[in-house]
Structure formats: C-alpha cells, structure tokens
Amino acid sequence: MAERNGDKRERRARRAASLTMAALALAVIALVGVALSGPIHRLGLLSARGALGLFGLSALVGFAAAVLAVWGIGLALIARAWRSVAGSGLALLVAFAASGPLLIMVRTAAAVPVIHDITTDTESPPQWVALQPSRAAAENGTAYGGIAVASQQKRAYRDLAPLVLALPPDRAFARAEAAARALGWHIVAAAPAEGRLEASDTTLWFGFTDDIVVRVRPAPQGSRIDVRSASRVGRSDLGVNARRIRSFLAAVARPGSR
C-alpha cells in the first residue's frame, strides 16, 4: 500500500513538474509578447492593429499560463513537490504580469464611451488645416461624428468646456502655445493671426499618434480657447483625449503661465 501511494505521489510530482515547465514557458512567451508589442509598433515593424493583436494574443497566452500554473501548484502541493510549487508560483506571477495590462485596458474601456474624437466645442469643432492630409490618410479621418459622438461625450465628460481668459487673443495664444510645448506636444503649425495651433502627441506605450488643434478667438471677457483632440486609429481612445484636453486647459489656466 505504501509503495502504491509512493508511486502515485511520484506520478503526481512528474505531472506537476511538466505543468510547471509548460506554465513557465507560456508565461515568459506572453510577457515577451506584451513587452515587445509597443516598441515593435514604434519602430514601424507592425501596424497599429498588428501591435494590438500581438498585445491581446500575448495576454491571452498569459491567462492560459496562469491556469496551468494554478493546476501545477495544486498537484505539486498534493505530491509535496516543493520545487514545482515554487516554479508554478513564479509562472503565475509572470503570467499575471503579462495579462494584467489587458485587464486594466478592458476595465478602462468599460468606464468610458467608445469614441475617439473629443472637443470643447461639439457644435463647431476646431478644424485641422496643416494636419488635414495626415488625418485624411488615417483610419479615423477628419470628419467629426456629430450629434451621436457629442451626446456620448457630454454624458461622460461633463467638465470639458471652453476656457475663457481675461487676456487679448495674442497673449492667450502665446500662453496656449507655451502650455502645449511644456506638455511635450509636437507643434505642427502655429498661426497666431488665425488663432490656430496644431500639434500631435503620442501615447505612452504603443506610440499611437493623436492630433490636436487649439482655437483662440476673441470673447467679450477676453479670449475663448477651444481644443479638439482625436486619435488617428481605434474606435475607443480609453479616455486619453479627454485627459489630454483637461491637462492642457489646466496648464493654460494656471496662474503664472506665460
């Protein structure tokens, strides 16, 4: 009986070791895929959709690795195979590191509307001029989504509104340009006489390009500043454009801004 129990434990230990190796291998592959998805797109080796596909597929592989790791831990505990317990535990941690970013992205996407073009003036959004060719060639184009997009934006981002400064337009424009440069935007066009500033910005990990246009107009109280920020690719921006506009308007309105 003791010999039979010993054989059973040994079989479980071997199975746990196999699961540990498989889980660890898959977890490492998943983490490498997730880690490379952004840089590969930044280097121009993959399209935006290809990079997102690699990211998503790698994260799913990470989920599979996590399942195998949990299974391996269970068997290893029963067999008292402590090395396999440690190895599967390591695989589980690596798998979580690989799949975690996708979970965060999904959670963020569920909390914001599926739109990618945000503006402080939904009735008459600022228009691109210098960036028109780039926008026209991009997946999301130049046209604003109209009432459907505006209504979703107003429900989700009630705080977004034009900024009114008690400054003449030329000084307001100078302050807006200084804020854009301070935020690290790439200035594409600055036309003070037209009150138009165009720029682009890239997302942190994948390096996706978003385009911005700032419009400065005279107002009874001084100047009115409107902003539009839109992604070139993707149906949802995960709230990035709204956050960018908030940061920009806060920088412009901050006391002491030039």
Image (cartoon, rainbow, N blue to C red):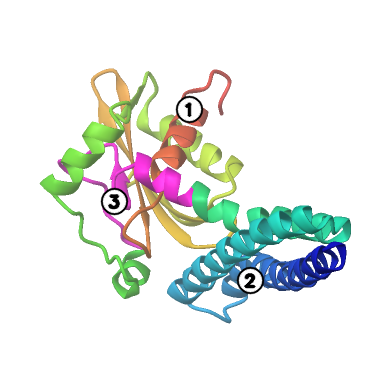
Q: Which residues are magenta?
A: 105-130
| Residue positioned 43% across, 73% down in the render | 49
Front residue of 109 and 242: 109
Mark 1 or mark 2: which is in front? 2
Mark drawn on residue 33: 2
Question: What separation in Å lies between label 1 and label 2 (alpha carbons)?
Answer: 37 Å
Kind of residue at badge 2: Gly
What SS does tag 2 mark?
A: helix
* Residue 196 visible at all: no
Asked whether the residues under the numbered discs 1 and 3 touch, taking CB atoms below 8 Å apart as contact, a structural biologist would say no
Question: What separation in Å lies between label 2 and label 3 (alpha carbons)?
Answer: 27 Å
Q: Is residue 126 magenta?
A: yes
* Residue 219 visible at all: yes
Q: Main secondary structure of the magenta part?
A: loop
- Say above or below: 53 vs 232: below
| Residue positioned 27% across, 30% down in the render | 218
Lateral position of residue 29 relative to residue 160, left or right? right
- Number of labelled discs? 3
Lateral position of residue 63 relative to residue 173, left or right? right
| Residue positioned 29% across, 50% down in the render | 114
Residue bearing mark 1: 250
Q: Is residue 108 magenta?
A: yes
| Residue positioned 32% across, 53% down in the render | 116
Instruction: Give the percent coordinates (x, y) of residue 177.
Output: 50, 41
- Badge 1, how many Cα within 10 Å: few under 14, some, many 20+? few
Instruction: Give the percent coordinates (x, y) of residue 13.
Output: 80, 66
Front residue of 10 and 240: 10
Residue bearing mark 3: 115
Lateral position of residue 77 relative to residue 35, left or right? right
Mark drawn on residue 72: none
- Badge 3, how many Cα within 10 Å: few under 14, some, many 20+? many
Mark 2 or mark 3: which is in front? 2
